[in-house]
Image (cartoon, grey):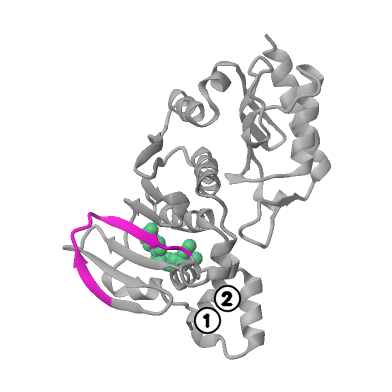
Amino acid sequence: TQLVNQIAAGEVVERPASVVKELVENCFDAGATQIQIDVEQGGTRQIRIRDNGCGIVKDDLALALSRHATSKIASLDDLEHVISMGFRGEALPSISSVARLTLISRTADADCAWQVSADGTEQNFDPQPDPHPPGTTVDVRDLFYNTPARRKFLKAEKTEFSHIESLIQKLALARFDVGFLLNHNQREVLNLKPADTQAAQEKRIAAICGSAFVENCVKIDFAASGLHLHGWVGLPTFSRSQQDMQFFYVNGRLIKDRLVAHAVKQAYQDVLYHGRHPVFVLYLELDPALVDVNAHPTKLEVRFREGRMVHDFLFQALHRSLADQRP
Ligand code: ADP
Ligand code: MG
């Protein structure tokens, strides 16, 4: 079983940031409005994620760390099938096979919290009481301690942490309704309160993209033929033009897409500035039937059913908004 888990972990867990991604998505699934992420040594020493979500009942704790598909894997063919399906419902068992994982959780109506734990060799599935408040903490220590080949591929502490930080930035711009606190080596890196007004959202954007961006940007809010584009595009006076400060969400999901990048760049350069990469935080809302979400859950790819139409809409929306508000 642990071998199966470790093979699965190869799909789910590439580096500390992939652990953080799986765990934070679980917090979202649990309806959390506040998520605290504590990272030690780039996440290789420790990743601890605490949320105020619905929690897990005592009897389900062991289940959460168990591979649901395990009993069904009878042959190599089955295993390959599970791998190609991308391991939904397998994140916690996978992580626990390549690290020391402790899961503590309490539902709103429970008298106390309960804890279980597992690592590459041992599973302590008999729940122990714990004073944890309602919600869940997942504590992951010594990632890849038992898989030296994987451990070797980890980069410097700074690099691994920067992957985690940029992941949290991306998630935080997708979920203004959730508060995020990110600490690295006990130092506060991001402290983002839930943001339900535009002013609060811009405060969050300033914390992530810099206050110069928010002070020198054009607000976009454009709808036509069932598509809606809104967000912020930085003006050329805002000089920090970094490729990685381009955030584009389709129906709440971050994507990287050549067609989108082309439309944005074209409109931007047409109206404002030639030869520079625009900085932007943009949200496109459209009928989900017009979007093919890539089968692989960790990829940032989509395919638009009407690519030309989406491209032209984006170009038009940005061209008009930028031209109207040109300084
Ligand atoms: P999946 O999220 O695909 O179901 P995971 O391995 O990520 O699989 O999580 C297993 C299960 O553990 C989840 O289905 C959920 O029931 C429970 N769980 C994990 N993290 C949390 C959390 N932060 N809050 C509440 N329940 C959680
Ligand atoms: Mg999950």
Marks 1 and 2, how far apart at CA: 6 Å
Label 1 sits on residue: 3
Mark 1 belongs to which amino acid? Leu
Q: What residue range appears in magenta?
A: 126-143
Q: Residue furthest top?
A: 327
Q: Residues within 10 Å of mark 2 (few under 14, many from 20)?
A: some
Label 2 sits on residue: 7
> For the stretch drawn in magenta, what is the main secondary structure?
strand
Q: Is 109 displayed left or right of 273 in the figure?
A: left
Mark 2 belongs to which amino acid? Ile
Q: Residue at x 64, y 87 (%)?
A: 76
Q: Is residue 322 magenta?
A: no
Q: Is residue 135 magenta?
A: yes
Q: Position of residue 234 (x, y in %)?
A: 64, 22
Q: Is 165 drawn above or below residue 67 in the view shown?
A: above
Q: Residue at x 75, y 37 (%)?
A: 261
Q: Position of residue 198 (x, y in %)?
A: 47, 25
Circle 1/circle 2 CB separation < 8 Å = yes
